[in-house]
Image (spheres, rainbow, N blue to C red):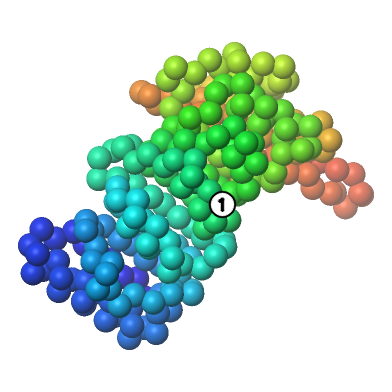
Amino acid sequence: MDIHTLLIDSPNYHQKAIEFAENMIKKGKYELPQLMVDMKDYPMETSKMRPLSRCKTIRICGDDKNQLRWWFEWFPEKNLDIRMFSRFENQLFISSEELNWPKIQQAQKFKLCGRAYFTDEQFLNLKIRMAGFASVSVSDDVINRFLKNWINGTGYKFHQILLGSINDRKIDTILRGIELREWDEDFREEAGFFYSEFHRFCGRGQLYQISNRIHPYESLTLQITDFEEAELNIYHTGKRQTARNGEYYTEYYVPSYF
């Protein structure tokens, strides 16, 4: 069962919508797998909400941090798919303290349509498999260290990290000391299907492959998009596979939609 709590301006409709939604959740024994919330001034004090132990997919629109924290209390501890956004495009700001909320730290997917104020340590110790942000506060040097940690086998195993806008960033600093393989004609011939499917699902731009020094058949795709406001995206696309004769080779995987 999916419950969509909609923003309604009339106070009477507002209250009735809440009562209806919470009664439906109760009838479902609080076992809904997905929750979408878009309502200002949710009456937390009078709510009859209970823990949503099976709810793994959460979409929350709002700027009230107390209300966000209140919603997070009802969700399971780990492996959540969380998306947070504001009614004003990219205007939600999450502090380093809020990024330490356990349910964000232990999420499997976390997308913030706004700016994430990571400390250097937080960013370098990310554990979220799929993460996306409109922008992040860390420096170009820290992003460079993040990439080098992965290259040297000390970074964590992520699927994709979308770092958002590169305005005011120095790409040369981000890529300093990193060996890149440009997506040229040779790469297109080697990975033809992946090459075309990546462009179809993830768009174009400047594209590079970055190999892991410890596991050389593993690689990242680094993308600087060609959108009007360019963005920096990092995907783990090259995976080591074993042929029937026991030899290793790289198989490329198109990132899943996020």
Question: Does 24 sit above or below residue 79?
Answer: below
Residue drawn where x is 31% and y is 70% of the image: 3
**Res 24 seen here:** yes
- Viewer-proximal residue, 233 or 60? 60
Q: Quick check: 33 above or below 83?
A: below
Which residue is painted at 34% across and 75% down in the image? 49
- The quadrant in which residue 90 appears is top left
Q: Does 53 appear above or below 29?
A: above
- The residue at 55%/23% (across/down) is 139
Residue 243 position in % (x across, y down): 85, 49
Label 1 Cα neighbours within 10 Å, binned few <14 / some 14-19 / many ≥20: many
Residue 196: x and y in percent read 55, 35
Please state which of residues 233 and 187 is positioned toward the viewer in this rendering. 233
Residue in view at x 48 percent, y 30 percent:
137
Asked whether, in this view, residue 163 is left or right of residue 91, the answer is right
**Residue picked out by circle 1:** 105
Q: Position of residue 138 (x, y in %)?
A: 53, 28
Which residue is at the far right? 245
Give 236 or 166, whichever is nearer the viewer.
166
In the rendered image, residue 92, in percent from the top left (x then y), is placed at: 34, 41
Q: Quadrant of residue 146?
A: top right
Secondary structure, mark 1, is: helix
